[in-house]
Structure formats: C-alpha cells, structure tokens
C-alpha cells in the first residue's frame, strides 16, 4: 500500500493514535520499577510516551484543519498526480489534441474536463504538474473562434493540483456555476506551486533568493504556455488568480507584483506577508529588498494599480484579521479592495467548500466573457506597466520591469 492511500485525517486515525498514546503514558509508571536497566528502560518509555502524545495531538490538529489528508501528502509523495482528472495531456500538453475528444464527449453532457499535464517553464526550466479545466463548450464549433478568460488557482501548502479536485470539488462546482450562468465559461489552470518533496518545502510562490523562481514560473511561464497552447485571452482583464490559505497569499502577491498580467485576485483565508516558520525556511537570505517586494500591503501602498482584490478572513482568526487591517490601510485607488469577515468556522477544508460558491460568484463579476479571436472589447482595454522587481540572482527570474514571456 502506498503512503498516499493511508488516510491520517479521519476520526478513526485520531482515535487509534490517542489510544496508543494513552497506553504509552500508562506504561511509564507501570514499568517504572520493573526494568532491569532502570535508566535505559525509564528513559525509553518516557520518550516513547512523549512522542506518542505529540503524534496523537498532531493528528488531532491535522484532522481539524484538514492539512495533510494522507501520509503521502505529509511525506511529499504522489504516485498519481493525475488523480481526479479525466485525461492526461502529456509533457507541455503535447497530447492536448488527443484529449479534446474526451472533452467533447463530456461537453455534450454539460460537463467540463479536468486534464493533467506537465509544464516546463520557458524562462525558469522548472517542470511542474499542472491541471487544466476546460469548460463545457470549449471544443464546440460555435466557440472555435473565441478566446476564454483564465482563472489561475493556486493550491494551498502542502497541497497539489489533484487535491483541488478531490478535496475542494472545484471542477463540479465550476460546471454548476457556468451552467447556471453564474460564471462565464472559463479556463482554470491549477499548477503545483511547490514541487516535491512537499514536507518543509513551502515556496510561498516567491522567487527565492538563489533558489527556485516560483513566482516567475507561476506568472510568466504559465502565461506563455497557456497563450501558446490554449484558446485563452491575452489581455490582463481576462486573467484572475485565486487560492486558499498560502494559495490566497500567492494569489494576492502575484496580482500585486504583476498587475500587467492579472486584473483580479481572490484570497480565501490568506495573508499578506510570508510566514517565518520551519516549513517555509529562509526564502530571502537576508535580502530585505526582496522580502519587502513580496509584502502585499507594501506593494499596494507603493505601487498602486487597477487590480480588484477579494480578501476573506475567519472571524476568529487574529492573523487573518490583522492582514485585512493592513491591506485596508494600504489599498487606495485605483486598487479596489473587497473584504469579507466570515462567521468563525476554522481554517479547514470544510470552510473552504462552504465559502467557494460565493467566491466564484465574486469572480463572475470580475472575469470577462470569451471574446472573438484577435479582439478585446474597447471598455476592457487597460494597459498597466510593470513595476521594478529586485534581482534575486536566479537565472530566468523576473527582474526590473522585464515582462518577457
């Protein structure tokens, strides 16, 4: 059995761990005077009891927050990155044409298609798993001459593209929203923001100093691939980005740093600055300028641009509410900031699934419709310049006002 098949977020897993921890604790006083080598025996059982209690507590917190659903997600292994998709389009989507037959069959039943592929960045040479949702109608003859708007969805840490389908249920929800005309037919690109291994490897979607150029991959590389491979709009008004938790920060940061490419972003229970913890590691290596350039509130204050942002926070989450306060203080026209303070529900996937329909409703008002090839409605033409980004020293990473794809 592969680690990815072992669930660690279920009540039974927590109960088993709690019982084992209790037995280990009881064993300490029971065996205290029974050991022949008392120092070794007492030390071993005490350490084992502590480990068991910490492990059981960790599983309890994990189950409450739905952070790591399986042992595989905790360890960073993924035997089937295409889980939840209906076809595999291969490296850089080379087999995309073959998969369109499946998409057409599903489209006849009013269903979109989630495809799996890998993308190797033109600038960064980073290769990551990517899922792509094609809406029902994407392959229909009447839409052949149209370009579709794009929503880039960033999975949370330690998530990956397949979890957006299997845990969020996003493709089914997109089908419903589009069918009920509560969302335009939209292409959704779901990249892996971190790569493997995932444990202690939270990239926060930034171009790390001397490290992977994650931001460049998620912005410039994915955009170039999509424009070359899919029928999608090239104007900034046709592109939005969204995510939950760390994916929410990624969405805000990408839009704030690259207003020339994104017109809207939605952050569900995200934040505005990168955390400083063991999972994130040292992303900036003492470069205060790079750290400052990845502070969303600072970017909005110092480089105001016509981006429309939705930021939500759980009413009981002090850190999320503090981020809202900082963003409110920083945002000024032409930036449009919408904030929702939600009923306390916890930082978990159940809360995400509850909130997601309303977030898609908001995105409906931000994303434009498909447009005929080669045209953009005049009222949607807005040219926004890039602001100068610091050089992180990684080959291929965006720097200065470079907007080359």
Image: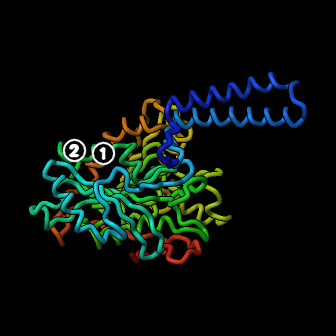
Q: Is residue 51 left or right of residue 319?
A: right
Crowding at label 2, few (<14), some or many (≥20) Cα neighbours within 10 Å?
A: some
Residue 371, compared with residue 359, is above or below; it is below
C-alpha separation, residue under disc 1 versus residue under disc 2: 8 Å
In this image, 210 relative to 119: left or right?
Answer: right
Give the percent coordinates (x, y) of residue 37: 90, 34
* Residue 154 position within the rendered picture, expressed as x and y whole percent measured from the top left: 42, 54
Given the current orientation, which residue lies at the most extreme front position? Answer: 36
Q: Is residue 240 left or right of residue 51?
A: left
- Identify the element where label 2 is drawn: loop
The residue under the point 61% across, 61% down is 283
Q: Is residue 143 left or right of residue 30?
A: left
Asked if 181 appears above or below 284 in the picture, the reply is above
Sequence-wise first label, 1 or 2: 2
Q: Is residue 329 visible?
A: no
Characterize the local packing of mark 1: few (<14), some (14-19) or many (20 or more) Cα atoms within 10 angstroms.
Answer: some
- Residue at label 2? 182
Tell me residue 80's x, y (percent).
Answer: 42, 55
**Residue at (61, 66) in percent of width and height:** 289
Q: Nearer the viewer, residue 178 or 81?
A: 81
Q: Residue at x 56, y 31 (%)?
A: 14
Q: Quadrant of the C terminus?
A: bottom left
Q: What secondary structure is marked by label 1?
A: helix
Taking depth in this image into account, of 25 and 364 the one nearest to the observer is 25
Q: Is residue 351 above or below residue 198?
A: above
Q: Position of residue 350 (x, y in %)?
A: 42, 35
Give the quarter of the image for residue 15: top right
Which of 256 and 397 lies nearest the eye of the viewer?
397
Q: Which residue is mark 1?
A: 360
* CB-based contact (under 8 Å), mark 1 and mark 2: yes
């Amino acid at each position: 059995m592969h680690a990815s098949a072992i669930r660690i977020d279920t009540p039974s897993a927590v109960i088993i761990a709690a019982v084992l921890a209790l037995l280990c604790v009881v064993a300490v006083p029971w065996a205290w005077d029974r050991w022949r080598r008392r120092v070794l025996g007492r030390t071993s059982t005490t350490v084992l009891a502590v480990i068991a209690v910490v492990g059981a507590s960790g599983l309890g917190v994990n189950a409450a927050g739905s952070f790591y659903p399986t042992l595989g997600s905790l360890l960073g292994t993924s035997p089937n990155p295409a889980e939840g998709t209906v076809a595999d389009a291969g490296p850089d989507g080379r087999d995309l044409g073959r998969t369109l037959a499946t998409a057409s069959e599903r489209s006849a039943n009013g269903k979109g298609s989630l495809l799996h592929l890998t993308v190797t960045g033109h600038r960064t040479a980073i290769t990551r798993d990517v899922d792509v949702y094609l809406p029902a109608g994407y392959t229909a003859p009447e839409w052949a001459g149209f370009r579709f708007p794009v929503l880039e969805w960033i999975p949370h840490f330690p998530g990956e593209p397949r979890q957006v389908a299997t845990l969020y249920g996003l493709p089914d929800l997109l089908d419903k929203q589009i069918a009920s005309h509560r969302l335009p037919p939209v292409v959704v690109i779901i990249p892996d923001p971190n790569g493997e291994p995932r444990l202690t490897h939270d990239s926060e979607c930034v171009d790390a100093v001397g490290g992977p150029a994650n931001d460049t991959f998620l912005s410039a590389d994915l955009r170039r691939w999509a424009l070359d491979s899919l029928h999608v709009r090239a104007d900034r008004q046709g592109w939005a980005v969204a995510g939950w938790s760390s994916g929410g920060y990624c969405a805000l940061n990408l839009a704030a740093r690259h207003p020339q490419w994104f017109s809207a972003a939605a952050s569900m229970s995200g934040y505005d600055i990168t955390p400083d913890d063991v999972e994130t590691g040292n992303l900036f290596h003492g470069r205060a300028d790079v750290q400052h350039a990845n502070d969303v509130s600072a970017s909005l204050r110092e480089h105001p641009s016509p981006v429309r942002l939705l930021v939500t926070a759980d009413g009981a989450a002090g850190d999320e509410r503090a981020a809202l306060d900082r963003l409110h203080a920083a945002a000024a026209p032409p930036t449009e900031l919408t904030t929702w303070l939600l009923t306390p529900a916890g930082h978990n996937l159940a809360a995400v699934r509850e909130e997601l329909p309303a977030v898609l409703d908001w995105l409906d008002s931000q994303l434009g419709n498909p447009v005929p090839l080669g045209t953009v409605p005049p009222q949607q033409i807005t040219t926004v310049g890039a602001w100068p980004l610091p050089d992180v020293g990684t080959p291929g990473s965006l720097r200065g006002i470079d907007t080359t794809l």
